[in-house]
Image (cartoon, helix red, strand yellow):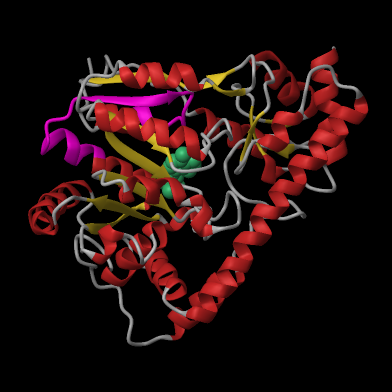
Amino acid sequence: MSIFSNVQTAPPIEVFALTRAYNADQNPKKVNLGVGAYRTDEGKPWVLPVVRKLEAQLAADETLNHEYLPVLGLDAFSKAAVHMLLGTDCPAVIDNRALGVQSLSGTGALFVGAKFLQKILGYDTYYYSAPTWGNHKLIFDTAGFKQGRAYRYWDPATKNIDFEGMCEDLRNAPENSVIILHACAHNPTGCDPTDAQWKQIAEIMRERKLFPFFDSAYQGFASGDLDKDARTVRYFAKEGFELFCSQSFSKNFGLYNERTGNLTVVMKDAELAAAVLSQLTLVVRATYSNPPAHGARVVAATLTNKDLFAEWQDHIRVMSSRIIQMREALRDRLVKLGTPGTWDHITRQIGMFSFTGLTPQQCEYLGNEHHIYLLRSGRANMAGLNTNNIDYVASAIHDAVTK
Ligand code: PMP
């Protein structure tokens, strides 16, 4: 009898299982609309030219080494990340009330933030949108939160936000609940509240003493404009909220496996920063001790140099506009084919994903019959589409819907 005998097999992580199935599929027509990674029009991953250039420089720089970074990471990086998120004219930045902690990408920032809230502040309830990114619950549960509750978000009937439902659920949340909010390009629905709706959300959260934990995984990637994609977090900060925001540089820098991220903390009083940072230091120390340097060096160099920054902004415009084009291409084809249903939501949605409205059965059918892989929820990565496969995907969706 092994001490491991009673270990139950955990469910597979759907998105990684999909990639495995896609990789094993020998059909030349196969299409991966699962994993959230950018692809060029040739269907290839894209190392951003500015990243390539900096990597060559870093490799040749003999002053660099592989010594440990400080526990809270590279200072130049976390400062630049905070500025990118909040803008340099943000009162919290000017007053030194905004801190950055380098993290293991967005996931690591969420975990470190959640663990701090649970362990140091004693928070025990968090809310996530229904639906949300598949990892939020796992992260907050693993960080020791006792209760995870959903707030209504997606209305399948309108293929839009159930704003009334969302507000009602937030109004009924117990004080001091942590509310996970997607800063922009909501994953998986691609639907963000309007500015007027965010204002109402902020009012409820202030009144009900709810703590905003923003998740910013797509800044610049959604609209092509860094300021536009950060406007909601900036609005909350300006309104005087204390908040956390996880930042991921996976998509906007294409640095997926370099685990490059930041936890931004906005607080009311600069004098509290030292104590907060000291506790975050211990959370990081216990979790992974200190973060990796490579991605942080690339991002810091880009964000702090005018020319490199301009070059990178071009790259994010290339990525975001290609995705917007693919949305239009897919919608147009489905309309032309006369595929039953309405398809305007595909172009109304923003960011990497479209929440297509396809049923789990239709998604499975697409995988089994047409070698097109997407999540059972109907979430499809629009960057997986390109001029070579768009007709094939559209007619396969038509088949799945009409069969
Ligand atoms: N939050 C959301 C909503 C995401 O979509 C992602 C990436 N899929 C992340 C966080 C974090 O990803 P990473 O850990 O690679 O930065």
Q: Nearer the viewer, residue 309 or 55?
A: 309
* Residue 130 pos. (x, y %): 46, 21
Q: Is residue 131 magenta?
A: yes
Q: Is residue 280 visible?
A: yes
Q: Which residues, given as a range, are shown in magenta?
A: 114-137
Which picture quadrant has residue 360?
A: top right
| For residue 313, side relative to residue 29 (left or right) | left
Q: Nearer the viewer, residue 166 or 359?
A: 166
| For residue 256, side relative to residue 283 (left or right) | right
Q: Nearer the viewer, residue 249 or 350?
A: 350
Image: 1 above or below 112? above
Q: Is residue 29 visible?
A: no
* Residue 323 pos. (x, y %): 69, 48
Image: 403 above or below 25? above
* Residue 351 pos. (x, y %): 60, 43
Which quadrant holds the N terminus?
Answer: top left
Q: Is residue 38 magenta?
A: no
**Could you tell me which residue is drawn at 57 percent across and 30 percent down?**
189
**Could you tell me which residue is drawn at 27 percent across and 16 percent down?**
5
* Residue 119 pos. (x, y %): 12, 36
| For residue 78, side relative to residue 268 (left or right) | right
